Amino acid sequence: MAAQVIGRRSPQDAAAVAEHQRRAQRRGRIIGIGRHLVLALICFILVAPFYYVVLASLKDSTGIFQYPPKLIPFPPYFGNYERLLTDTAFPRWMLNTLFVATSVTVCKIFLDSMAGYALAKLDITGKRIVFMLLLLLLMVPFGALIIPLWTLVYTLGLLNTYWALILPALANPLGVFLMRQFILGLPRDLENAARLDGVSEFGIYWRIILPLIKPGLVVLAVIIFTDQFMSFVWPLISTSSDDVELVTVGVAALRSHGGVDYGLWSASAVMSMIPIGIVFFVLQRQFLARSLAGALKQ
Amino acid sequence: MSRMRLAAAEHRRLRLRARLRRELIGWAFLGPMFFFFVVFLLIPVLGTGWWSTQFGGLTTGTHYVGLDNFTRLPDVVGATVAVQNTLLFALMSVPLILIGSLLIGLLLARISRGGATYRFLVYFPVLVPPVVAALIWLFLTNVDFGLFNEVLRAFGAEPVTWLGASTALPVLAALDVWRNVGYWAIFFVAAIIGLPEELYQAASLDGAEGFAKLRYITIPLLRRILLFAIVVATIWGLQVFDTALVLTNGGPGTSTTTIVLRVWQYVFGSNNKVGYAAAISLVFLVAILILTVIQLYALRSRRGED
């Protein structure tokens, strides 16, 4: 019918329709370009600070204060990085951070997926209470628990050890909900079939559930690793020697002791972003899913 | 007859055994995580309550003072200022974060080409540890060579002391916006993409323009998502500590001393204020628990609706 209507139109009408379409198209294209311009500007503003710090890290102390500032660091000066790697314990801090973050991530993946499996599929008394408790304390930050946590770890004699950094981090309930949600989404048939075949509960968890929720495990690993990489309050309180200190605490200490040293600070800022930057580049999709962890909980 | 009774008893016994087995297996899975949760989260939360009734220092011994810490809390100058600063900080940063990220999210959700690049760039500041973010902002806010003042000079304006008493807290809030806007932007992109396309087509047929669609379709559909974002962003905002410590160390004066920073100072910088610190912590904890319940409510009603 529509074709008939158009067919009956006079040539002038057809020209007007075409003109209208062209105009709408052009308007759409202009809006599209505007959108790109605004986004590009926002991205530029968000990223410019990084460039400014990288720039500062490649200048010597007079170069940093030079006005007008050189926007292309040529020839680059690597003295700041040299001092960071030789005069401070930065490499050790970085190793500590990677070790602690990896340990917590590996432990959490098993603890959370097991607990998530129990909450999703197994029938046990007290499940509801446990679930409500975990949910209620989901958002409690370390900052609010400084005193009792410190006392607890002090009493256990664990201050200044890796244990002090790893064990409290295992308490976070977020991952349990993520895992529960993923496992609830799996079809029951597979595990029931396995149960009929006489596979034990652990066998079902290990050989059926874990492989099926692998994408969820990667997202969880990314969430936990990033949180650990950034953690500061608790490491600051529970450690004080270079042997176990984390990058965040070490870098903050560079700022508070040892006078003003902008070159060293900028180099430490750049260096401490490198590991997480690499992981982000490789696992972009999973990182963006991290932002949805809250939505996934639904 | 007796054979049947025996069978019934046997049946009960077997059922009990099966049930016991099921419980044991279930708790073997749930137990390890729950153990850490109880020891390192539940007990410390309760412990904060106990410490708030004490007077003294962390390692120097304490005695019971009942609710004195709470009744005296409003008169302790440092405590009141810290609460004020933290609330003011959240009031400045949270709305900006959410409005900014909603705007970016709306732009990003409707983009056809280059979306991945934008998402990568927008998200990058999110991955910077707060401590490092604060270091970076030292280079932006420096009076002599900071980026902000270089830009001002380029436009012929007077340089500003960014970390001065009146501007330090807004700068701290701006840092938080820079660090968190990408997180919520990506969150909103996913939420907006998930909205039903038909509604927008129907609205277009009715002649609705871009803003009307936003006002009458997008925002109402995102209501619960928005409530969730507001609550969680507030919870995170109230915890501000790392950036305040590194950027300004709570100063100048007490202008950027936040709740957690004050607690930390009371516990480790003084030998008789651990009770006050615990009392503030407890108030802080209760506030976060209330916000958590609101957030759970937001998610719960959403699930009921779907």
Image (tube, rainbow, N blue to C red):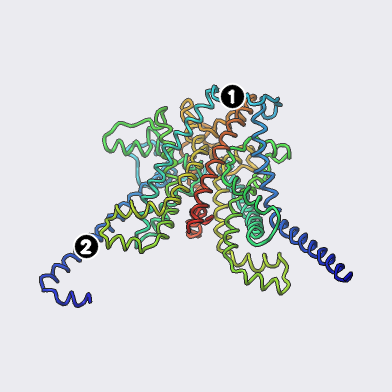
Query: Which numbered marker is on residue B71?
Result: 1
Using the rendered image of the protein, determine whether residue B198 is visible from the camera's viewpoint.
yes
Left or right for B126, reference A197 = left
Residue pictured at 41% horizontal, 56% vertical: B189
Residue occupying the far front of the picture: B1
Left or right for B1, reference A139 = right
Left or right for A147, reference B107 = right
Q: Callout 1: 10 Å neighbours few (<14), some, many (20+)?
A: few
Picture coordinates of residue B139, whole percent (x, y): 42, 38
Picture coordinates of residue A243, whole percent (x, y): 65, 42
Using the rendered image of the protein, determine whether residue A277 is visible from the camera's viewpoint.
no
Vertical position of residue B192 compared to residue B81: above or below? below
Instruction: Indicate the amino acid at tag 1.
Output: Thr
Q: Chain of mark 2?
A: A
**Which residue occupies the foreground of this view, B42 or B255?**
B42
Picture coordinates of residue A141, whole percent (x, y): 57, 42
**Which residue occupies the foreground of this view, A252 or B266?**
B266
Q: Chain of mark 1?
A: B
Instruction: Indicate the amino acid at tag 2.
Output: Ala
Residue occupying the far right of the picture: B2
